[in-house]
Amino acid sequence: MNIRDKQDKQEKRKMEEYKKHPMINFSDSINHSTMGNLNELTKGGCLTKIIIIVIIIGILFFLSRYYS
């Protein structure tokens, strides 16, 4: 429950901060939309993870062939 209490306090603090400075929320939204959230890549199923690993290995393979 201690972790849950910490998370609740952080949520309340964020909400108070957003109420004080409403442009913070807008700024965060813009930053997340342009950069993306890399954690979303790991939340997929097994097939998604396999596809991502294959893509990363392929990119690394092509970069190693190109720069050597």
Image (cartoon, grey):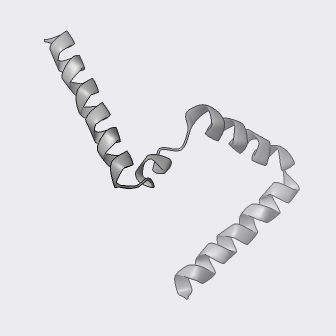
Q: Quadrant of residue 43?
A: bottom left
Residue 31 on image: x %, y % = 65, 37
Residue 56 on image: x %, y % = 29, 33
Figure check: 59 above or below 46: above
Comparing 37 with 53, the one in front is: 53
Residue 41 on image: x %, y % = 44, 46
Q: Quadrant of residue 46?
A: bottom left
Q: Can you say which quadrant of the picture contains the C terminus?
A: top left
Q: Quadrant of residue 10?
A: bottom right
Residue 24 on image: x %, y % = 77, 46
List the single residue furthest toward the front.
Answer: 47
List the single residue furthest toward the left.
Answer: 68
- Name the residue: 23% across, 18% down: 63
Q: In the figure, is residue 5 to the left or right of 26?
A: left
- Name the residue: 53% across, 44% down: 37
- Name the residue: 56% across, 38% down: 36
